[in-house]
Amino acid sequence: QKAYLVSAQQRFPFNVRHSLANLNQIEGHLVRWMEEIKDRYEWIMKVDTDEFVAYAPGDGPPDVSSSSLHLPRGAARVTLKVEWVFVMDAPRLGSALTDGERGAKHAARGFKQIYSGPRFDARTFLLGSQAPRSGGGETATGLSIVHYHFRSYEELVRIAYQVVLSHGYILATDCEAEAIRKLPCIASAVGAPSQHKAKILFAHLTNGTQERAKYYQEHGNSGPALREWRNYLRRLFNPKASPYASILHHDDVPAASAAEAQQPPLAWPPCAIETGASASDSHSAAGQAQLQAALPLAQAAASKEPKAIVVKRLCGI
């Protein structure tokens, strides 16, 4: 990954920072970097590597004829909400990201917000850049995210595991039953960082077969709404001209067989506690109610302690 970013910096106007920070540390790092660059930009947006920024007026697909996002000057607002998100179907295993063309356009609601450079306020920044779902904040008309989030079910679970592990909610040495014991408290904690990843992993561990079937039923029926966008990405990342051909185009990678796709995505260490053990007393209904009441107060205290550490302490893990 580091070599890829170095080569990307040489080809594109990227400012690359390498960091070994975990998810409990990276939010502070990002805020400091944004403070450093805020005077050079009208708007700053935090996106993941599976997210592409686009302009999509009205109800139509992204406009690939112009690179303009039609944003106001940065001094106009402290933050702006993204208006649309294109939710992609899970691609076939072994396919390139740029092959995706099936997706559906939805109102972004609280999916993303962007930050003014001239008026940047660190107190408005969140690691996921979630925007308020109702009230407060203006929407940037047409500003969209094409999100290649829905990959194979196995990859979805693997990423959820990595995120939960990076926060320290579970340990690499935890067995499956120990993870099942810890995750309900995290998944129900109001405002816990990456709470949705804990929900995904817990649902997989307790009901994996049904969750996999539901996943493909929900993310396999969209129409080809992004054909022009797919072609645009192919031109942008032309495999014949790009130094990233092996990364961006995978014609030489065989699709996984049905048997391989059915294999469990994670291998857990042997368990020292009984499989299927229920949540401990610290994760009881009373404990969860106490957590839900305490967590907003802990967040409001403006402590420098990472939120995930506060959640772990309140959950007793």
Image (tube, rainbow, N blue to C red):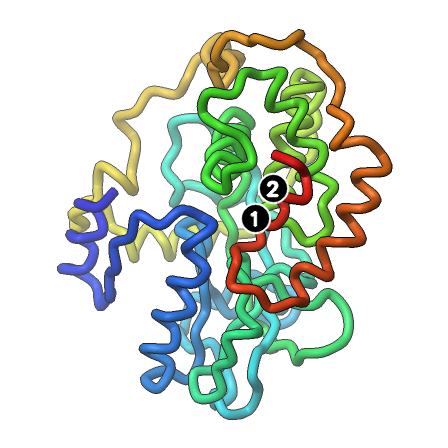
Residue found 55% across the figure and 45% down from its top: 88
Q: What element carries label 2?
A: helix
| Image mark for residue 308 | 1
Q: In this view, does 188 lie to the left or right of 111?
A: right
Judge by depth and name the residue closer to the eye, 108 or 301: 301
Q: Residue at x 41, y 41 (%)?
A: 99
- Residue 50 vertical placement versus 284 (above, below): below
Q: Where is residue 101 in the image (x, y as percent from the top left)?
A: 50, 45
Q: In this view, does 95 lie above or below 248?
A: above
Front residue of this view, candidates 148 and 171: 171
| Whole-percent x, y for residue 277 in the image | 72, 14
Position of the N terminus, as image quadrant, is top left
Res 216 seen here: no
Dot 1, crowdedness within 10 Å: few (<14), some or many (≥20)? many
- Whether residue 213 sits left or right of residue 95 in the image: it is right
Q: Position of residue 186 (x, y in %)?
A: 66, 39
SS category of the residue bearing label 1: helix
List the residue tagged with mark 2. Answer: 312
Disc tally is: 2
| Amino acid type, residue under disc 1 in the picture | Ala
Q: Circles 2 and 1: CB distance less than 8 Å? A: yes
Quarter of the picture holding the C terminus: top right
Q: What is the x, y in percent for residue 118?
A: 44, 88
Q: How far apart are marks 2 and 1 (CA)?
A: 6 Å
Residue at the image position 64 percent from the left and 55 percent from the top:
105
Residue occupying image coordinates x 45% and y 39%: 166
Whether residue 174 sits left or right of residue 59 in the image: it is left
Callout 2 crowding tier (Cα within 10 Å): few <14, some 14–19, many ≥20:
some
Quarter of the image holding residue 208?
top right
Q: Does any portion of residue 106 appear in the rendered image?
A: yes
What's the amino acid at mark 2? Lys
Which label sits on residue 185? none
